[in-house]
Amino acid sequence: MKVGYIHFYGLGDNIFALEPLFALKAIFNCEVIVFGNAIMKNLLLHCDFVDFVHDIQGDIASHIDLFNSYNLDYAILTNCKRCYLYPLQASNVKTIITTTKIPSLFSMRCKTIPIHLLPKYRNMTRYEQGLSYVRKINPKLFDTKIKTICLNNAKVKTTQEQKEKVKSFIANHAKTRGGGGNSKLILINPFSHTATHTLPLESYIEIIAHISNMQNCIPIVATYPQIHDYFLEALSTWKNETKQEISNLIIFQNDDDILNLAALIEQMDYVISPSTGTIHLASNLGVPTIGLFSAYDTKKWGTKSKQYVILPYEKTQMNENDIQQAITQTLHILQENIKN
């Protein structure tokens, strides 16, 4: 059996697809072909539970020949927009599994799941919704086997070279910043494109400064090309305004390779972040997390650690008291974790 999985989103949403992909391979022992984007291709580069990964850049219509070349028995389409469904129906895919919408509901080739219609599905986490597509292939077999597989094995894989490079980077920088071998490495991620509920950048820098003053703790920030200079400018402004230094802060300047970030996260003791790809990557890798989340995101986009600071308002509506409470709660949760 050959199953195509069509999914092209941002980092966090792509990470939530790993468990369904792992379940596909483990339960049905099928050939798994992923049609995604560059981020998905990067994430799955070393994962052995998928057979082929193609970056189709969100364009199904231009890749019909590619779809046809696989003679797919099933295609799981996680986004049932007309611009995706109609071209896919022009391919030779035998059965399309997707959400229940009018175009899919009345298609003889579609098996649909009412994810947006029934409370049972609306209340599911993103992981559970993803697994519901896989279940649709053969519900009886799925229900029998899902209890026998370990979904924690659906992890992003990094190479030994990437691991060693990150270990060397941390060891060299920790040594020059006075960190010992017993230091806790805390990754603080202030960056998010999509999270409405988060803190201003200067508030994350304040959290970093507090962590810097904790015994045996080293704060780390991972930047990437688009925000590296922006972060350095904000950090410089904060230092000038507060007359403080953060002497043991390590800045990991990444390129656009998600697997370098994954290799860094694997070495962390804790990750602090809003609801965005970085924290979901940490959760996937089994690293303890503290999420600065909206109450809604704890249910739909929850982490395995289930440790949250609930932000009551969107960033633009947070007043100084709200922000300081969030900072205090974040530091308290971290300190309690370190003590234990």
Image (cartoon, helix red, strand yellow):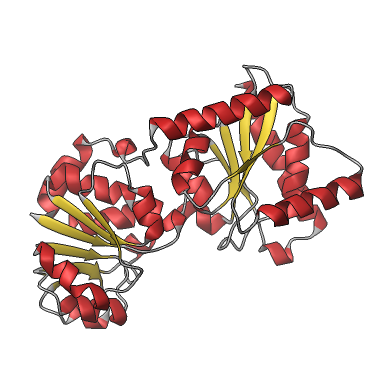
Where residue 47 appears, as percent x and y from the top left, is 29, 42
Nearer to me, 338 or 162: 162
In this rendering, position of residue 337 left or right of residue 89:
right
Please identify the quadrant where the N terminus is shown. bottom left
Where residue 249 appears, as percent x and y from the top left, is 72, 35
The answer to which image quadrant residue 314 occupies is bottom right
Is the residue 108 above or below the residue 318 in the image?
below
Q: Residue at x 65, y 22 (%)?
A: 183
Nearer to me, 304 or 279: 279
Q: Residue at x 36, y 55 (%)?
A: 40
Is the residue 162 above or below the residue 222 in the image?
above
In this rendering, position of residue 260 left or right of residue 200:
left
**Outermost top residue:** 181
Q: Residue at x 8, y 64 (%)?
A: 71
Instruction: Answer whether residue 182 is visible to the viewer in this image.
Output: yes
Where residue 151 appears, as percent x and y from the top left, is 30, 39
Please identify the quadrant where the C terminus is shown. top right
Where residue 153 appears, as percent x and y from the top left, is 31, 36
The answer to which image quadrant residue 284 occupies is top left
